[in-house]
Image (spheres, grey):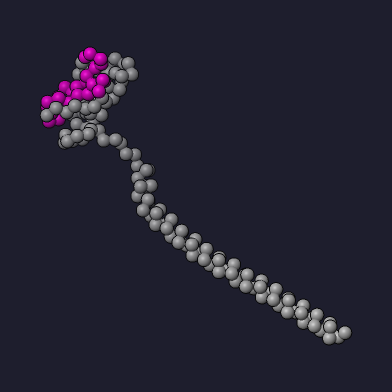
Amino acid sequence: MDDHKDTDIAKDAVAEFAKEEAEREQQQQEKKKTKDRRLLYYALLALSIVVLAFQVPRILSLREEHAKPLRVGTADTDMQTDACIHNLWKVVRDLQLGETDVGGFTCPLSGVPYEVHQVKGGYVVECPNAHRHGFSHVRISTAKPIPELVP
């Protein structure tokens, strides 16, 4: 009977050893998977940092207010002419909103109030001293609010 118990004990020990060995092997495989995943995580982290680094200038530029260009085309204007165009747009906007008293706006270069002419379908607002800006006409109409700079 002692032999029977010894063989049972030996079988139990071998089974327990095999079970522990299987658990160790499983833990090692899990560690290997974790290490493999860590490599993937580090690669994703590095990729995210690179993408973010390339986007930093764009993100920082969002803090600054970028105004739309005052004109489109090939006319070369200075700051005073740009300010005059900006004022003309304000006058046209007021006229489009139905206001008739727009005499408070003046040309920043000469200080003379803008000329407002009523035409079919709206108004034309013109700088009285366009020649001082280097043009024969600087005007905007309510029908087509695009600056016209006539050389």
Q: Is residue 13 magenta?
A: no
Q: Is residue 34 left or right of residue 46?
A: right
Q: Is residue 75 left or right of residue 100?
A: left
Tell me what residue is drawn at x 32 percent, y 39 percent: 66
Tell me what residue is drawn at x 21 percent, y 27 percent: 147
Task: Kindly indicate the quadrant of the structure image that contains residue 76.
Answer: top left
Q: Residue 132: where, in percent of width, then height?
A: 13, 28
Q: Residue 38: where, in percent of width, then height?
A: 51, 64
Q: Is residue 129 magenta?
A: yes
Residue 78 visible at all:
yes
Tell me what residue is drawn at x 80 percent, y 80 percent: 8
Depicted 118 relative to depicted 130: above or below:
above
Q: Residue 32: where, in percent of width, then height?
A: 55, 69
Task: Kindly indicate the quadrant of the structure image that contains residue 114.
Answer: top left
Q: Quadrant of the C terminus?
A: top left
- Which residue is at the front of the view, 110 or 50? 50
Q: Is residue 27 left or right of residue 11?
A: left
Q: Residue 69: where, in percent of width, then height?
A: 26, 35
Q: Quadrant of the N terminus?
A: bottom right
- Which residue is at the front of the view, 59 or 88? 59
- Which residue is at the front of the view, 147 or 94? 147
Depicted 43 relative to depicted 10: above or below:
above
Tell me what residue is drawn at x 59 percent, y 67 percent: 30
Depicted 107 relative to depicted 29: above or below:
above
Residue farthest to the bottom?
A: 3
Q: Which residues are magenta?
A: 119-144
- Which residue is at the front of the view, 89 or 46? 46
